[in-house]
Amino acid sequence: MATLLRGEVRAILQPAGHAQYQGAYCPPGVPFAEVRRGPFDGKTDIVVRPDRNGDVPKLMTFGRGQVVYEYDGRDGKGRAVYRYAPKLSSSHRDVMRGVAEVYAENALNKAKGGQ
């Protein structure tokens, strides 16, 4: 675990909550629960630095800004909780299309009597 510098706050990345995933793209054949999943969920070795007012950044981005996590308050351990924001993530549609292909392939294999 990283050592905190003065003023820094530990953060954790979590799946999208209702506010983040409501209205997000979900292709046909994919359970809507898949929309909630972000590529960095569960990551806890993140540190953020609050501004002069003590506010942490509202957004955290990864992958050249293509994956966005949105601040959603603090947890019981005092960590800043960031939730995956599919509506703000430019890579979300492409990822969901890939997920849809996997679901379609699995359905096809199942229909053929495979796995």
Image: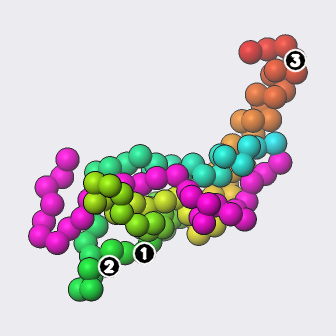
Q: Is residue 15 above or below residue 49?
A: above
* Residue under numbered circle 2: 55
Q: Where residue 14 sits: x, y (%)?
A: 46, 52
Q: Do callouts 2 and 1 mark residues in contact (Cβ within 8 Å)? A: yes
- Mark 1 Cα shell of 10 Å, populated few (<14), some (14-19), many (≥20): few
Residue type marked 3? Lys
The answer for how far apart the CA atoms under marks 3 and 2 are is: 55 Å
Q: Nearer the viewer, mark 3 or mark 2?
A: 2
Q: Secondary structure at mark 2?
A: loop
Residue at which label 1 appears: 58
x and y percent of residue 114 in the render? 79, 14
Q: Position of residue 54 (x, y in %)?
A: 26, 80
Can see residue 45? Answer: yes
Measuring 80% from the left and 35% from the top, which residue is drawn there? 104
Q: Which mark is residue 112?
A: 3
Say whether residue 26 is magenta: yes
Q: Residue at x 32, y 50 (%)?
A: 44
Picture residue at 41% right of the left edge, 46% below the top? 42
Identify the residue at the far right of this view. 111
Sequence-wise first label, 3 or 2: 2
Magenta stretch, residue numbers: 1-28
